[in-house]
Image: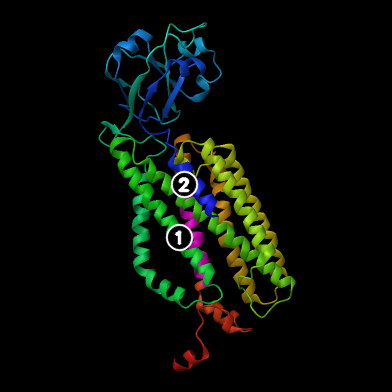
Amino acid sequence: MFLFVINIIALLFSSSPANAKTVSGVFRSDAARENNGQYITRFLYHGDNGLLVYRVDNVDMAVQKEARLLMFQGLQAFENLSCLERVSSAHISIKLRKEEQNQTIPKQSGPQLQWHVMYTDRYTCQEGQMDGQLEDVHFQITLLNPDAAGNPLDHFSAEEAGLHNFYFMSILAYFVASCIYVQPLWQALSKGGPMHTVLKVLSTALLLQGTSVLLNYIHMARYARDGVGTPLTGSLAELCDMIAQVQMVYMLLSLCVGWSLSRSRKSLSKPLQWDSSPVSTGVALATVITQGALLIWEQFEDTEHHSFHAHRSIAGRLLMLLRVALALFLASVLYRIVSAERSTLKRDFYLSFAKGCFLWFLCQPVLALFSLTLNEHQREKVITIGVILCQCISVVVLYRLFLSRSLYWEVSSLSSATLPLTMSRTARERY
Protein backbone atom coordinates (compact mmCIF):
# COMPACT_ATOMS: atom_id res chain seq x y z
CA MET A 1 0.00 0.00 0.00
CA PHE A 2 2.82 2.40 0.90
CA LEU A 3 4.63 1.79 -2.41
CA PHE A 4 1.39 2.33 -4.32
CA VAL A 5 0.85 5.71 -2.64
CA ILE A 6 4.47 6.76 -3.31
CA ASN A 7 4.16 5.83 -7.01
CA ILE A 8 0.91 7.75 -7.36
CA ILE A 9 2.44 10.83 -5.66
CA ALA A 10 5.49 10.76 -7.93
CA LEU A 11 3.34 10.29 -11.02
CA LEU A 12 0.86 13.02 -10.22
CA PHE A 13 3.48 15.54 -9.20
CA SER A 14 5.38 15.00 -12.43
CA SER A 15 2.23 15.41 -14.56
CA SER A 16 0.95 18.69 -15.89
CA PRO A 17 -2.67 19.03 -16.98
CA ALA A 18 -3.03 19.53 -20.73
CA ASN A 19 -6.46 21.08 -20.41
CA ALA A 20 -5.39 24.36 -18.81
CA LYS A 21 -7.17 27.20 -20.61
CA THR A 22 -4.07 29.36 -20.45
CA VAL A 23 -1.64 27.12 -22.28
CA SER A 24 2.08 27.84 -22.47
CA GLY A 25 4.62 25.88 -24.45
CA VAL A 26 6.74 25.72 -27.58
CA PHE A 27 5.69 25.50 -31.22
CA ARG A 28 7.93 22.84 -32.76
CA SER A 29 8.14 22.32 -36.50
CA ASP A 30 9.39 18.75 -36.14
CA ALA A 31 6.49 17.82 -33.85
CA ALA A 32 3.99 19.41 -36.23
CA ARG A 33 5.52 17.56 -39.17
CA GLU A 34 5.58 14.21 -37.40
CA ASN A 35 1.92 14.39 -36.36
CA ASN A 36 0.47 16.34 -39.31
CA GLY A 37 0.08 19.26 -36.95
CA GLN A 38 1.08 19.91 -33.34
CA TYR A 39 -2.00 19.46 -31.14
CA ILE A 40 -2.26 22.22 -28.53
CA THR A 41 -5.52 22.00 -26.56
CA ARG A 42 -9.31 21.90 -26.75
CA PHE A 43 -12.09 24.15 -25.47
CA LEU A 44 -15.88 24.17 -25.44
CA TYR A 45 -17.22 27.61 -26.28
CA HIS A 46 -20.78 28.77 -25.70
CA GLY A 47 -22.76 31.85 -26.61
CA ASP A 48 -21.32 35.06 -28.09
CA ASN A 49 -17.93 36.69 -27.61
CA GLY A 50 -15.80 33.56 -27.35
CA LEU A 51 -12.15 34.55 -27.63
CA LEU A 52 -8.72 33.07 -28.33
CA VAL A 53 -5.68 35.19 -27.43
CA TYR A 54 -2.19 34.15 -28.48
CA ARG A 55 1.23 35.59 -27.67
CA VAL A 56 4.54 34.53 -29.26
CA ASP A 57 8.05 35.61 -28.28
CA ASN A 58 9.70 35.41 -31.74
CA VAL A 59 7.43 36.92 -34.36
CA ASP A 60 10.13 36.99 -37.05
CA MET A 61 10.70 33.24 -36.80
CA ALA A 62 6.95 32.60 -36.82
CA VAL A 63 6.58 34.68 -39.97
CA GLN A 64 9.56 32.91 -41.59
CA LYS A 65 7.94 29.54 -40.87
CA GLU A 66 4.54 30.78 -42.08
CA ALA A 67 3.20 29.59 -38.75
CA ARG A 68 -0.54 29.23 -38.25
CA LEU A 69 -3.02 28.14 -35.64
CA LEU A 70 -5.81 25.94 -36.98
CA MET A 71 -9.10 25.50 -35.17
CA PHE A 72 -11.44 22.58 -35.83
CA GLN A 73 -14.92 22.11 -34.41
CA GLY A 74 -15.25 18.47 -33.42
CA LEU A 75 -12.51 15.84 -33.26
CA GLN A 76 -13.85 13.89 -36.24
CA ALA A 77 -13.37 16.99 -38.40
CA PHE A 78 -9.62 16.44 -38.71
CA GLU A 79 -8.44 13.15 -37.21
CA ASN A 80 -8.91 11.04 -40.38
CA LEU A 81 -7.68 13.64 -42.88
CA SER A 82 -4.36 13.77 -44.68
CA CYS A 83 -1.96 16.57 -43.88
CA LEU A 84 -2.96 18.85 -46.77
CA GLU A 85 -6.67 18.12 -46.28
CA ARG A 86 -6.35 18.91 -42.60
CA VAL A 87 -4.67 22.26 -43.22
CA SER A 88 -7.18 23.30 -45.88
CA SER A 89 -10.29 22.17 -43.99
CA ALA A 90 -9.75 24.10 -40.76
CA HIS A 91 -12.77 26.10 -39.63
CA ILE A 92 -10.52 28.98 -38.52
CA SER A 93 -6.93 29.66 -39.63
CA ILE A 94 -4.90 32.25 -37.71
CA LYS A 95 -1.59 33.43 -39.14
CA LEU A 96 0.97 34.22 -36.47
CA ARG A 97 2.16 37.61 -37.74
CA LYS A 98 1.91 39.64 -34.53
CA GLU A 99 3.37 39.29 -31.08
CA GLU A 100 -0.17 39.26 -29.65
CA GLN A 101 -3.52 38.89 -31.35
CA ASN A 102 -7.16 38.30 -30.39
CA GLN A 103 -9.35 35.98 -32.43
CA THR A 104 -13.12 36.15 -31.92
CA ILE A 105 -14.92 32.83 -32.21
CA PRO A 106 -18.14 32.75 -34.27
CA LYS A 107 -21.37 32.79 -32.30
CA GLN A 108 -22.26 29.41 -30.84
CA SER A 109 -25.90 28.32 -30.85
CA GLY A 110 -25.01 26.09 -27.90
CA PRO A 111 -22.00 24.26 -26.44
CA GLN A 112 -22.31 21.35 -28.86
CA LEU A 113 -18.81 20.54 -30.14
CA GLN A 114 -15.30 20.99 -28.81
CA TRP A 115 -12.99 23.42 -30.57
CA HIS A 116 -9.54 21.88 -31.09
CA VAL A 117 -6.44 24.05 -31.57
CA MET A 118 -3.48 22.85 -33.64
CA TYR A 119 -0.21 24.41 -34.82
CA THR A 120 1.14 24.06 -38.38
CA ASP A 121 3.74 25.82 -40.50
CA ARG A 122 5.25 25.60 -43.99
CA TYR A 123 7.18 22.44 -43.08
CA THR A 124 4.26 20.44 -41.66
CA CYS A 125 3.19 18.86 -44.96
CA GLN A 126 6.54 19.23 -46.73
CA GLU A 127 8.36 16.12 -47.93
CA GLY A 128 12.13 15.77 -47.68
CA GLN A 129 14.48 17.52 -45.26
CA MET A 130 13.71 20.81 -43.55
CA ASP A 131 15.82 23.86 -44.38
CA GLY A 132 18.46 23.86 -41.67
CA GLN A 133 17.91 23.99 -37.93
CA LEU A 134 15.00 26.26 -37.12
CA GLU A 135 14.37 27.81 -33.74
CA ASP A 136 11.29 26.90 -31.75
CA VAL A 137 8.72 29.57 -30.96
CA HIS A 138 7.50 29.97 -27.39
CA PHE A 139 3.83 30.75 -27.04
CA GLN A 140 0.99 31.39 -24.64
CA ILE A 141 -2.63 30.80 -25.65
CA THR A 142 -5.62 31.88 -23.58
CA LEU A 143 -9.15 30.66 -24.37
CA LEU A 144 -12.08 32.56 -22.90
CA ASN A 145 -15.84 32.17 -22.73
CA PRO A 146 -18.23 35.06 -22.05
CA ASP A 147 -19.06 35.64 -18.40
CA ALA A 148 -22.48 36.51 -16.97
CA ALA A 149 -22.13 40.05 -18.31
CA GLY A 150 -21.21 38.83 -21.78
CA ASN A 151 -17.54 39.81 -21.53
CA PRO A 152 -14.90 37.26 -22.63
CA LEU A 153 -13.32 36.77 -19.19
CA ASP A 154 -14.36 33.24 -18.19
CA HIS A 155 -11.54 30.68 -18.36
CA PHE A 156 -13.86 27.73 -17.74
CA SER A 157 -14.86 25.56 -20.67
CA ALA A 158 -18.59 24.89 -20.95
CA GLU A 159 -18.29 21.39 -19.47
CA GLU A 160 -16.56 22.81 -16.35
CA ALA A 161 -18.94 25.69 -15.71
CA GLY A 162 -20.62 25.35 -12.33
CA LEU A 163 -18.12 22.94 -10.75
CA HIS A 164 -16.47 25.79 -8.87
CA ASN A 165 -19.76 26.68 -7.14
CA PHE A 166 -20.48 23.01 -6.46
CA TYR A 167 -17.17 22.56 -4.64
CA PHE A 168 -17.87 25.69 -2.59
CA MET A 169 -21.30 24.40 -1.53
CA SER A 170 -19.75 21.00 -0.72
CA ILE A 171 -17.14 22.64 1.52
CA LEU A 172 -19.90 24.54 3.30
CA ALA A 173 -21.86 21.31 3.82
CA TYR A 174 -18.76 19.53 5.16
CA PHE A 175 -18.09 22.40 7.56
CA VAL A 176 -21.63 22.46 8.93
CA ALA A 177 -21.74 18.66 9.29
CA SER A 178 -18.37 18.59 11.04
CA CYS A 179 -19.47 21.24 13.53
CA ILE A 180 -22.51 19.12 14.38
CA TYR A 181 -21.10 15.60 14.38
CA VAL A 182 -17.37 15.75 15.05
CA GLN A 183 -17.67 15.59 18.86
CA PRO A 184 -20.12 12.63 19.02
CA LEU A 185 -18.06 10.83 16.39
CA TRP A 186 -14.84 11.38 18.31
CA GLN A 187 -16.49 10.03 21.45
CA ALA A 188 -17.68 6.95 19.53
CA LEU A 189 -14.19 6.32 18.17
CA SER A 190 -12.67 6.75 21.63
CA LYS A 191 -14.84 3.96 23.03
CA GLY A 192 -13.28 1.36 20.75
CA GLY A 193 -15.17 -1.88 20.17
CA PRO A 194 -15.13 -4.68 17.61
CA MET A 195 -16.10 -2.34 14.75
CA HIS A 196 -13.61 0.33 15.76
CA THR A 197 -11.50 -0.33 12.64
CA VAL A 198 -14.54 0.09 10.37
CA LEU A 199 -15.39 3.43 11.93
CA LYS A 200 -11.79 4.60 11.56
CA VAL A 201 -11.72 3.63 7.88
CA LEU A 202 -15.04 5.39 7.24
CA SER A 203 -13.80 8.49 9.07
CA THR A 204 -10.55 8.49 7.12
CA ALA A 205 -12.37 8.03 3.80
CA LEU A 206 -14.75 10.89 4.59
CA LEU A 207 -11.84 13.10 5.66
CA LEU A 208 -9.98 12.32 2.43
CA GLN A 209 -13.06 13.07 0.34
CA GLY A 210 -13.52 16.39 2.15
CA THR A 211 -9.85 17.22 1.61
CA SER A 212 -10.20 16.38 -2.09
CA VAL A 213 -13.19 18.72 -2.41
CA LEU A 214 -11.30 21.52 -0.62
CA LEU A 215 -8.22 21.13 -2.82
CA ASN A 216 -10.35 21.08 -5.96
CA TYR A 217 -12.02 24.30 -4.84
CA ILE A 218 -8.65 25.97 -4.24
CA HIS A 219 -7.45 24.84 -7.66
CA MET A 220 -10.58 26.10 -9.44
CA ALA A 221 -10.63 29.39 -7.54
CA ARG A 222 -7.16 30.13 -8.91
CA TYR A 223 -8.12 28.67 -12.30
CA ALA A 224 -11.00 31.13 -12.56
CA ARG A 225 -8.50 34.01 -12.36
CA ASP A 226 -5.68 32.87 -14.64
CA GLY A 227 -6.88 29.80 -16.54
CA VAL A 228 -4.05 27.70 -15.10
CA GLY A 229 -4.89 27.21 -11.44
CA THR A 230 -2.55 25.22 -9.21
CA PRO A 231 -1.99 21.88 -10.96
CA LEU A 232 -0.20 20.48 -7.89
CA THR A 233 -3.28 21.15 -5.76
CA GLY A 234 -5.52 19.49 -8.33
CA SER A 235 -3.22 16.46 -8.39
CA LEU A 236 -3.29 16.25 -4.58
CA ALA A 237 -7.09 16.33 -4.71
CA GLU A 238 -7.06 13.39 -7.10
CA LEU A 239 -4.57 11.55 -4.89
CA CYS A 240 -6.80 11.97 -1.81
CA ASP A 241 -9.77 10.58 -3.72
CA MET A 242 -7.72 7.59 -4.93
CA ILE A 243 -6.59 6.70 -1.41
CA ALA A 244 -10.19 6.92 -0.19
CA GLN A 245 -11.27 4.59 -3.01
CA VAL A 246 -8.57 2.05 -2.11
CA GLN A 247 -9.42 2.16 1.59
CA MET A 248 -13.12 1.63 1.02
CA VAL A 249 -12.56 -1.28 -1.38
CA TYR A 250 -10.29 -3.01 1.12
CA MET A 251 -12.73 -2.49 4.00
CA LEU A 252 -15.89 -3.57 2.17
CA LEU A 253 -14.31 -6.71 0.73
CA SER A 254 -12.68 -7.67 4.02
CA LEU A 255 -15.98 -7.33 5.85
CA CYS A 256 -18.06 -9.29 3.36
CA VAL A 257 -15.59 -12.13 2.85
CA GLY A 258 -14.84 -12.24 6.56
CA TRP A 259 -18.52 -12.53 7.43
CA SER A 260 -18.99 -15.24 4.82
CA LEU A 261 -16.07 -17.28 6.20
CA SER A 262 -17.31 -16.72 9.74
CA ARG A 263 -20.72 -18.16 8.89
CA SER A 264 -19.17 -21.12 7.14
CA ARG A 265 -17.32 -21.87 10.39
CA LYS A 266 -20.62 -21.44 12.28
CA SER A 267 -19.01 -18.91 14.60
CA LEU A 268 -21.88 -17.08 16.29
CA SER A 269 -20.03 -15.74 19.31
CA LYS A 270 -19.07 -12.50 17.56
CA PRO A 271 -21.79 -11.54 15.09
CA LEU A 272 -21.33 -8.75 12.59
CA GLN A 273 -17.68 -8.14 13.48
CA TRP A 274 -14.77 -7.61 11.13
CA ASP A 275 -13.67 -11.23 11.17
CA SER A 276 -10.46 -10.99 9.15
CA SER A 277 -8.66 -14.09 7.92
CA PRO A 278 -5.84 -14.85 5.47
CA VAL A 279 -8.44 -15.56 2.78
CA SER A 280 -10.43 -12.37 3.26
CA THR A 281 -7.27 -10.29 3.55
CA GLY A 282 -5.82 -11.92 0.42
CA VAL A 283 -8.97 -11.26 -1.64
CA ALA A 284 -9.07 -7.64 -0.50
CA LEU A 285 -5.37 -7.06 -1.17
CA ALA A 286 -5.54 -8.66 -4.62
CA THR A 287 -8.43 -6.39 -5.57
CA VAL A 288 -6.70 -3.31 -4.15
CA ILE A 289 -3.52 -4.10 -6.11
CA THR A 290 -5.57 -4.53 -9.31
CA GLN A 291 -7.34 -1.26 -8.72
CA GLY A 292 -4.05 0.46 -7.94
CA ALA A 293 -2.48 -0.81 -11.17
CA LEU A 294 -5.46 0.46 -13.18
CA LEU A 295 -5.29 3.85 -11.47
CA ILE A 296 -1.59 4.20 -12.31
CA TRP A 297 -2.25 3.10 -15.90
CA GLU A 298 -5.04 5.66 -16.17
CA GLN A 299 -2.65 8.45 -15.14
CA PHE A 300 -0.43 7.66 -18.12
CA GLU A 301 -3.37 7.52 -20.53
CA ASP A 302 -5.52 10.42 -19.37
CA THR A 303 -3.67 13.73 -19.04
CA GLU A 304 -6.86 15.67 -18.28
CA HIS A 305 -6.75 15.14 -14.54
CA HIS A 306 -9.65 17.52 -13.89
CA SER A 307 -12.00 14.93 -15.41
CA PHE A 308 -10.72 11.84 -13.58
CA HIS A 309 -14.24 10.92 -12.43
CA ALA A 310 -15.33 10.57 -16.05
CA HIS A 311 -12.85 7.72 -16.77
CA ARG A 312 -12.53 8.33 -20.51
CA SER A 313 -9.45 6.14 -21.09
CA ILE A 314 -9.26 2.37 -21.51
CA ALA A 315 -7.91 1.98 -17.97
CA GLY A 316 -10.78 4.12 -16.69
CA ARG A 317 -13.32 1.89 -18.38
CA LEU A 318 -11.63 -1.17 -16.88
CA LEU A 319 -11.92 0.51 -13.48
CA MET A 320 -15.67 0.86 -13.97
CA LEU A 321 -15.91 -2.79 -15.02
CA LEU A 322 -13.98 -3.72 -11.88
CA ARG A 323 -16.48 -1.79 -9.75
CA VAL A 324 -19.38 -3.61 -11.41
CA ALA A 325 -17.64 -6.97 -10.84
CA LEU A 326 -17.03 -6.10 -7.19
CA ALA A 327 -20.68 -5.12 -6.76
CA LEU A 328 -21.79 -8.47 -8.23
CA PHE A 329 -19.32 -10.34 -6.01
CA LEU A 330 -20.52 -8.54 -2.88
CA ALA A 331 -24.12 -9.17 -3.91
CA SER A 332 -23.48 -12.91 -4.16
CA VAL A 333 -21.68 -13.00 -0.79
CA LEU A 334 -24.36 -10.98 0.99
CA TYR A 335 -27.13 -13.04 -0.65
CA ARG A 336 -25.66 -16.22 0.81
CA ILE A 337 -25.38 -14.61 4.23
CA VAL A 338 -28.89 -13.14 4.22
CA SER A 339 -30.54 -16.32 2.86
CA ALA A 340 -29.02 -18.35 5.71
CA GLU A 341 -29.79 -15.77 8.39
CA ARG A 342 -32.87 -16.38 10.53
CA SER A 343 -32.80 -13.15 12.50
CA THR A 344 -34.86 -10.42 10.83
CA LEU A 345 -32.87 -7.69 12.55
CA LYS A 346 -29.56 -9.06 11.37
CA ARG A 347 -30.95 -9.48 7.85
CA ASP A 348 -31.92 -5.81 7.93
CA PHE A 349 -28.38 -4.99 9.02
CA TYR A 350 -26.85 -6.88 6.09
CA LEU A 351 -29.34 -5.41 3.61
CA SER A 352 -28.57 -1.87 4.77
CA PHE A 353 -24.88 -2.65 4.47
CA ALA A 354 -25.49 -3.91 0.91
CA LYS A 355 -27.20 -0.63 -0.03
CA GLY A 356 -24.17 1.34 1.10
CA CYS A 357 -21.82 -0.97 -0.83
CA PHE A 358 -23.81 -0.89 -4.06
CA LEU A 359 -24.17 2.88 -3.92
CA TRP A 360 -20.38 3.23 -3.57
CA PHE A 361 -19.47 0.83 -6.39
CA LEU A 362 -22.26 1.34 -8.91
CA CYS A 363 -22.76 5.11 -8.86
CA GLN A 364 -19.88 5.79 -11.25
CA PRO A 365 -20.75 3.17 -13.91
CA VAL A 366 -24.44 4.08 -13.79
CA LEU A 367 -23.74 7.81 -14.05
CA ALA A 368 -21.28 7.20 -16.90
CA LEU A 369 -23.93 5.29 -18.84
CA PHE A 370 -26.57 7.90 -18.06
CA SER A 371 -24.25 10.70 -19.22
CA LEU A 372 -24.19 9.20 -22.72
CA THR A 373 -27.76 10.44 -23.14
CA LEU A 374 -26.70 14.02 -22.32
CA ASN A 375 -24.96 16.69 -24.33
CA GLU A 376 -21.18 16.72 -24.25
CA HIS A 377 -20.94 19.82 -22.07
CA GLN A 378 -23.16 18.22 -19.40
CA ARG A 379 -21.44 14.84 -19.07
CA GLU A 380 -18.44 15.70 -16.95
CA LYS A 381 -20.45 17.81 -14.52
CA VAL A 382 -23.11 15.12 -14.06
CA ILE A 383 -20.52 12.40 -13.42
CA THR A 384 -18.34 14.49 -11.10
CA ILE A 385 -21.14 15.91 -9.00
CA GLY A 386 -23.08 12.63 -8.96
CA VAL A 387 -20.11 10.49 -7.92
CA ILE A 388 -19.07 12.83 -5.09
CA LEU A 389 -22.62 13.07 -3.74
CA CYS A 390 -23.37 9.34 -4.04
CA GLN A 391 -20.15 8.26 -2.38
CA CYS A 392 -20.68 10.73 0.46
CA ILE A 393 -24.20 9.36 0.92
CA SER A 394 -22.78 5.83 0.89
CA VAL A 395 -20.36 6.69 3.71
CA VAL A 396 -23.18 8.33 5.69
CA VAL A 397 -25.38 5.21 5.24
CA LEU A 398 -22.59 3.00 6.55
CA TYR A 399 -21.93 5.42 9.41
CA ARG A 400 -25.57 5.35 10.47
CA LEU A 401 -25.54 1.58 10.27
CA PHE A 402 -22.51 1.03 12.45
CA LEU A 403 -23.29 3.86 14.86
CA SER A 404 -26.97 2.99 15.32
CA ARG A 405 -27.42 2.20 18.99
CA SER A 406 -31.00 1.00 18.63
CA LEU A 407 -30.19 -1.56 15.93
CA TYR A 408 -27.12 -2.85 17.73
CA TRP A 409 -29.03 -2.97 21.01
CA GLU A 410 -31.62 -5.31 19.49
CA VAL A 411 -29.21 -7.36 17.40
CA SER A 412 -26.84 -7.83 20.34
CA SER A 413 -29.04 -10.32 22.15
CA LEU A 414 -26.52 -13.10 21.49
CA SER A 415 -23.53 -11.21 22.85
CA SER A 416 -24.02 -7.53 23.65
CA ALA A 417 -20.46 -7.12 24.86
CA THR A 418 -19.10 -7.87 21.40
CA LEU A 419 -21.01 -5.10 19.65
CA PRO A 420 -19.76 -1.50 19.57
CA LEU A 421 -21.43 1.56 20.99
CA THR A 422 -23.85 -0.30 23.27
CA MET A 423 -24.41 0.71 26.86
CA SER A 424 -23.37 -1.83 29.42
CA ARG A 425 -25.87 -3.28 31.87
CA THR A 426 -24.36 -1.20 34.66
CA ALA A 427 -24.73 1.96 32.63
CA ARG A 428 -28.34 1.12 31.82
CA GLU A 429 -29.21 0.75 35.47
CA ARG A 430 -28.18 4.35 36.03
CA TYR A 431 -30.85 5.42 33.58
Instruction: Examine the structure image and report whether residue 422 is included in the region drawn in magenta.
Output: no
Distance of label 2 from label 1 (alpha carbons): 20 Å
Check the image and report above or below for 254 versus 123: below
Instruction: Examine the structure image and report whether residue 396 is included in the region drawn in magenta.
Output: yes
Q: Residues within 10 Å of mark 1 (few under 14, many from 20)?
A: some
- The quadrant of the picture occupied by the C terminus is bottom left
Q: Which residue is mark 2?
A: 9
Type of amino acid under label 2: Ile
Sequence order check, earlier mark of 2 and 1: 2
Check the image and report above or below for 88 versus 211: above
- Residue stretch in magenta: 384-402
- The quadrant of the picture occupied by the N terminus is bottom right
Q: Which residue is mark 1?
A: 206
Label 2, secondary structure: give it: helix
Residue shown at 38% from the left, 43% from the top: 232
Give x and y (percent) for residue 379. 48, 40
